[in-house]
Amino acid sequence: MTAPDRAATPATDAGVVDPDYPVTPVPAHARKSFFSVAVVLLGFTVFTPTMLAGAALGPAFGFGDLLLVILAGSAILGTYVAVMGWIGARTGLTTVVMSRYTLGSRGAKLASILLGGTQIGWYAVVVGTIGDLTAEATGWDSYGARAAVMVVTSALMCATAYWGYHGMYWVSLVSTPLILILAFWVLARSLQEVGGFAGLADVQPTTSMAIAVAITTVVGTFVSAGTQAPNWTRFARRGSHAVWACVIGFLIGNGLMIFFGAVGALTFGEGDFVLVLYQLGLVGWGLVLLFGNLWKSNADTAYAFGVAGAELFDRPSKAPFVIGGSVIATVLALTGVQNHLVDYLVLLGTFIPPLGGVIIGDFLARWRRGIPSGTVPPAVRWPNLLAYAVAAFLAWLSGELGIGIPPLIGIVVAVALSVGLSRIGTGRPEPVGAGR
């Protein structure tokens, strides 16, 4: 039985005008191969700003401990995203549309605002970063030149997201291998600076960081975006394809970028490979890496706030929201928001993982056999909103007190409360005709 047979929304295929099906299940004929889904997710996570997280970790640990921190954080992130991706493939739905069944048709607006708003913010930060780094590389002091770079690059990213899944696939297919080849080459140059891995192992920590904080940093790099993995894994033909694509993208791809950033910090004192290339006198290659990498990642970001907008306003097309969100983000970038917004976005990262945890718990408790065709979600599903609120508060509190790993606490508490409240309250419904 195909995934679209097991899931439905109030809209029908006949009313879909967007080939990416932002508010309806992806039908069987539109599903993609494992290779295609893996390319898109890997292109999403091979993201140069992630290296800055690695740069913060590198000087704080010996090489062996550093590897353990990266592996632990990547394993938590990869497992969480893989489960979300599996649910996306099973239902054929985006994260925000799945929220309708978990939080209710009105409660889901919280998810759309939270996820879509966060992605608009990240889009603005990336566009602003491109303008600033390009100006630094070329020696441009003019605000007009920097602003022109922001507007032109934003237009390219918006157009790619407007094109949809196909646009993101082709950009990722071309740029990701080039970026990884260049990244491994710079890694080799970095190892030459310290005498290979043996020399790297001899580098002593110069700063300190608690293990829990370090693992939280690794998990936090992509946990917000990972919550929206179903936006792409819903195109997978099988749940197993979605799981392995998420492992490749979020465990391997994201973990490598953190590792590259940590090594860059240890050897060059700079975690961003773009700036390392500048130091090596390779300004041209640095700009190629910068544009290629951020172009594909921000196209995925624009796609995410596009489908969130489609759900928020109950429209069958993501296109107007991709354009509108890109315009808003570009205006924010032109005001220099990239210099002030990152802390706010990191804070949101504490509150988004519990949303994914509630979706996972609700799916396991009530929808493992599928969402019966014609199911109409209630306006508000209060037990799951309560589960989300409690989990988000505990995640925030753990960060304030420095106890545990906030994203992990938020996810685990949300899953447990959602499963428990679903079974105590209404029980687990038996989908008619959906068994296997």
Image (cartoon, rainbow, N blue to C red):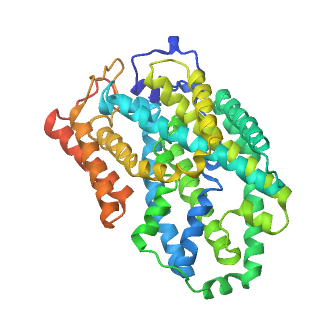
Residue 177 point in image, percent of width and height: 74, 53
- Residue at the extreme bottom: 202
Left or right of 304 on screen, residue 427: left
Evaluate whether residue 158 shows in this view. yes
Q: Quadrant of the N terminus?
A: top left
In the image, residue 405 lies at what x, y percent? Answer: 36, 63
Q: How many marks?
A: 0
Image-quadrant location for residue 266:
bottom right
Quarter of the image where the C terminus is located:
top left
In this picture, residue 311 sits left or right of residue 292? left
- Could one spot residue 178 in this view of the protein? no
Residue at coordinates 68% horizontally, 47% vertically from top-left? 294
Residue 221 image offset from top left, x and y in percent:
52, 56
In front of the other: 162 or 135: 135
- Which quadrant of the view contains residue 137? bottom right
Which percent across, then down, holds residue 30?
A: 59, 26
State the residue in front, 188 or 328. Answer: 328
**Residue depicted at x 71% and y 63%:** 273
